Amino acid sequence: MAIKKNDFIEIEFTGKIKGTDEIFDTNIKVDAPTTNDQRPTTELKPFILSVGHKMLPNGFDADLEGKDTEKSYTLDLKPEDAFGKRDPQMVRMIPTKHFHEQKINPERGMKLALDGQLVKILSSDRGRTLVDFNNPLAGKPVTYTYKINKIVTDQKEKINALQDFLFRKTFEFEIKDKTVIFKIEKQFEPFVKMFAPKFEEILDLKIESEIIKAKEKKKEKKE
């Protein structure tokens, strides 16, 4: 059965810089040792996504429509269809003291998270540090090989897939009629509300929250 927009699918893929053997992303265990991915291989598993909702780079997402399950495909993408072209305005000079305040000693070539974004240090001296805020893959053509394992129809699997993608966290929930009720602690309520419209757009289900008490941490027994 051909894949269409809004279908949920389970997919395995590996992304490489085009024309090289450099793997920048994969969810296939046998490919993982050659990547820079720091995740343990035990965490790698097929990815469940909703087609047409930009859960993968735009060109990759668009290529899924019309494809069949249990077949392997290869896709070449230009930078503008993958991680975008490099933007010179995304290279900025920042006072070095900003890094020192965070107990970071910036050095040329260093990659680190700055204000929630992955950046690369291009140069640094005592007073100023040149930082590249472009995506590390910006400006690079890439190649994906992928296989769609199956179409996912289970509603709970779909909800958990979206939780994993949007929340990076999984909450308990129940489904009543056309409403998903997440059981969350009070501090997570604004977080769930922020992503509720995306859930509703993709699943056509209303989102509500049921506030529960915070789970108490078990105290370690002293011998």
Image (tube, rainbow, N blue to C red):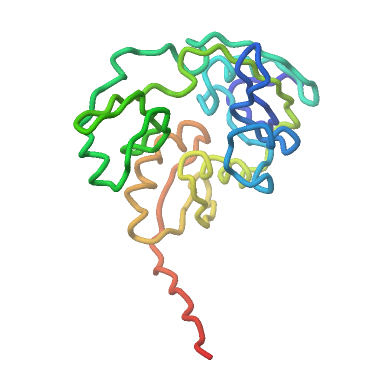
- The residue under the point 19% across, 31% down is 127
Q: Nearer the viewer, residue 89 or 81?
A: 89
Q: Position of residue 185 (x, y in %)?
A: 39, 61
In the displayed structure, does residue 207 sit left or right of residue 12?
left
Is 158 above or below relative to 49? Answer: below
In the figure, residue 52 lies in which quadrant? top right
Residue at image point 44% right, 42% down: 206
Give the image quarter of residue 88. top left
Is residue 24 something that shows in the picture? yes
Quadrant where the N terminus sits is top right
Residue at image coords 72%, 17%:
67
Residue at the farthest front position: 126
Towards the viewer: 100 or 137? 100
Counting from the top left corner in percent of width and height, residue 186 is at 34, 60
Regarding residue 152, the answer to whether it shows in the image is no
Q: Estimate the x, y position of residue 150 in percent, counting from the top left.
A: 74, 32
Counting labels gives: 0
- The residue at 80%/21% (across/down) is 71
In the rendered structure, the answer to whether residue 114 lies left or right of residue 166 reads left
Q: In the rendered view, would you say 117 is above or below 173?
A: above
Q: Nearer the viewer, residue 90 or 108?
A: 108
Q: Residue furthest bottom?
A: 223
